[in-house]
Amino acid sequence: MLFEMTIQVRVKDMKEGQRWYQTLFNRQPDFLPHEGFAEWEIIPGCWLQVAEGIPAEESGPLRLGVKDIVGERDRLIKELNIAMFEIYSREEVPVKWGTFTDPWGNLLGFFEYLNKKEEKKRIHTILGN
């Protein structure tokens, strides 16, 4: 039985990496088990581990669901100086999405449900609110 998951990205400079991801998530890490390692519980049971080390080439993207993809993209361009990224959609896909990188080359992205009733249902199922 699966009940929880973690995914890890690596950064060459842990101090800068922690600061960058704190800005991405708008909060401090949930767990700092030891030097060179920080963890955020993104949603219940789903953890992102940021570890000091050599980033894996072309891994990901790790896509995060957001309510407003344009607003989040604009915030990261302003606060983290990421490059402008395209937002895509296709008729047969229920979300729009975009991909960007952190300063270490880890692929990340956002997606936003097109149907806001479905989005609200998913949020309730996952978070209970």
Image (cartoon, helix red, strand yellow):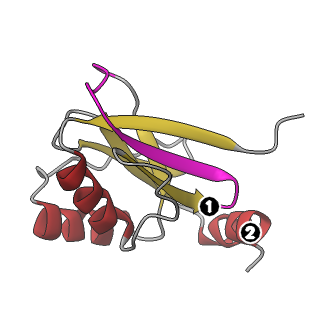
Q: Is residue 98 left or right of residue 15?
A: right
Q: Is residue 34 above or below residue 78?
A: above
- Residue lying farthest bottom? 129
Pointer 2 with pointer 1, Cβ within 8 A: no
Closer to us: mark 2 or mark 1? 1
In this view, the residue in front, 71 or 11, is 11
Numbered disc 1: secondary structure: strand
Residue 22 in which image quadrant: bottom left
Q: Residue at x 73, y 63 (%)?
A: 126
Q: Residue at x 15, y 69 (%)?
A: 79
Q: Where is residue 51 shown, x and y percent of the image?
A: 37, 39
The residue identified by callout 2 is: 121
In this view, the residue in front, 79 or 54, is 54
Q: Amino acid at mark 1?
A: Ile
Q: CA distance from mark 2 to mark 1?
A: 15 Å
Q: Is residue 28 left or right of residue 41?
A: left
Q: Residue at x 78, y 74 (%)?
A: 128
Neighbourhood count class around disc 1 (C-alpha, 10 Å): few under 14, some 14–19, many 20 upward: few
Q: Where is residue 16 shown, x and y percent of the image?
A: 18, 53
In this view, the residue in front, 37 or 43, is 37
Magenta residues, start to end? 43-58
Q: Is residue 63 left or right of residue 108?
A: right
- Which mark is drawn over residue 64? none
